[in-house]
Image (spheres, rainbow, N blue to C red):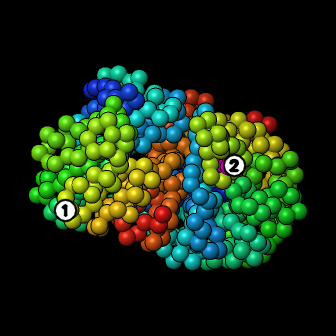
Amino acid sequence: MKKSIFTIENNERLTNDVYRIMLSGDTSAISAAGQFVNIELDGLYLRRPISVCDLEGTMLTLIYKVVGRGTEKMSLLTKGKKLDLLTGLGNGYDTSKSGDNPVIIGGGVGVPPLYMLAKKLISAGKKPKAILGFNTKSEIFLEDEFSALGIDVYVASADGSYGIKGYVTDALRECGAYDYTFSCGPEPMLKAVYNAAETDGQYSFEERMGCGFGACMGCTCETKYGFKRICKDGPVLERGEIIW
Amino acid sequence: MVDTKVVLNNIVLDNPIIPASGTFGYGAEFTELYDLNILGSISFKGTTLNERFGNKTPRIAECESGMLNSVGLQNPGLKAVCEHELPNLAQIYKKPVIANISGFSLEEYVECARAMDKKENVGIIEVNVSCPNIHGGGMSFGVLPEAAAEVTKAVKAVTTKPVYIKLSPNVKDIAAIASACEEAGADGLSLINTILAMRIDLKTRKPILANKMGGMSGAAIFPIALRMVYQVYESVKIPIIGMGGISSAEDVVEMMLAGATAVQVGAANLKNPFACKEIIEDLPRVMEKYKISSLCDIIGGAH
């Protein structure tokens, strides 16, 4: 973990309520896809945890959805503004456990951390394919970026307005063989993927956090291997330890 | 050169800054950021006889200048704390620590105190009679003067280490409870614990915390904590560790003027993991600004 000041380079709207913010600063504490940063915002007591979408040198990309006061404040921030971040939080995905042909499955605002994961898997010599699930066509983001990585991308929309009609689990049935599963999204989606997936895998969870670095025990869940802090021992849990 | 040393019973602290129980774990998360040995002491995560998961999540909510928690005393239990956490803490922190203990019965308090009494790196035993999160448990000991006195006597009987009772603000007359603890033999008092509070989610129209209610902490509660320390200081002679929303070196000085001999910093650690370090480093500047040569001289100075 590191605490340092980042400078906003860009903050743009991607869909109705989803934004991409790019920040430059000391990214050296970030080691794995699926980790997150915890952002201090003026006027709010607690920091806001946001997963890392991409990392290129000192440039950090986050994609967030406006869901409350914190993310609303974030959406109004402009280029040049400085932000205090805790970086390198959480365990992140362990790509070494994957076979050569993993499938990565994201739903809604759970999609962003999987972009960095896809890049990590590719650079590790693996051939991932991606399934991205959204409610409707207007909410889709990052499809082009995933495609530009040269991997197969399957987009599912719940209302059938784009791609495969249905959920990510419908796309999972159509995407062909895979030997490992990486997933991030709302808990009902994770559970559906867990039940549908035919392989081992890793699942990234969300919880209301206090500190974000393991001190307050605010986000603990029970697993088959004991109590785990989502912020420190997670947010990524292995399939074999999850208790629903 | 200003003198930041303070004395709790016979223990000399290099400065009065102590991370509060439940906001600092056993120090492991913070030791990668700075050398913990700058701290006056450390009050580690509350220990109960048996391992506890605590309450369901969500356990955290936010408010203006503060937060609510309903963690519910999650901890690995007395045996694991004594065998693993305390030895690990001794590796990263060389000074005496404060053992915060909780219980659901007198026997449980006694058993925890007896085990902590044997631990070399434990300087003070801090008895939590005030956690608002345990149904029908911890709360009752801290709410009635007689019950607080009873637990004080029981713990004092099994240890030679200084015993501090950590008081709840969720009571009618905190000074009466403080006096009862002093009469029962308490060596000091820690106050205040969190204030019982609630938030409701407008989208779901239900309480945010799964436990519905939780303890409020953070800068917002500082004036309440200060008032209670001021009141308690007028009714007891034993030292007070003041806490509740302390976020700056100025707050430390203010709390000491109200009557605290040392302070604990809680929620501020969660917002800024360097909070204690920054307060310690800023303390000499603030002392010079207000012409304080020795912190010991200002304890209770506002009375």
Q: Residue at x 55, y 33 (%)?
A: B286
- What residue is rendered at 78% in x and 48% in y? B170
SS at circle 2: loop
Q: Is residue A167 left or right of residue B233?
A: left
Query: Looking at this view, is A61 or B148 the one in front?
Result: A61
Give the label on residue A177, or none. Answer: 1
User: Is residue B26 visible from the viewing direction of this image?
Assistant: yes
Left or right: B94 as drawn, with respect to A88: right
Foreground pick, B137 / A192: A192
SS class of the residue under badge 1?
loop
What is the span of residues highlighted in magenta in the rendered image? Answer: B212-216
Where residue A118 appears, x then y in whole percent? 20, 50
- Where on the picture, by quarter, is residue B223? top right
Q: Amino acid at mark 2?
A: Met
Viewer-side residue, B24 vs A188: A188
1 and 2 marks in contact (CB < 8 Å): no
* Chain label for disc 2: B
x%, y% of residue B296? 66, 45
Query: Dot 1, how many residues are within 10 Å of its Cα: few (below 14), some (14-19), or many (20+)?
Result: few
Whether residue B5 is visible to the viewer of this picture, yes or no, is: no
Q: Identify whether B120 is placed above or below B64.
A: below
Can residue A104 be found in the magenta stretch?
no
Residue B213: say if magenta.
yes
The chain holding disc 1 is A
Amino acid at circle 1: Ala
Q: Residue at x 35, y 21 (%)?
A: A78
Spatial separation of the CA atoms under disc 1 and disc 2: 48 Å
Q: Position of residue A138 (x, y in %)?
A: 33, 30
> Which residue is tagged 2?
B213
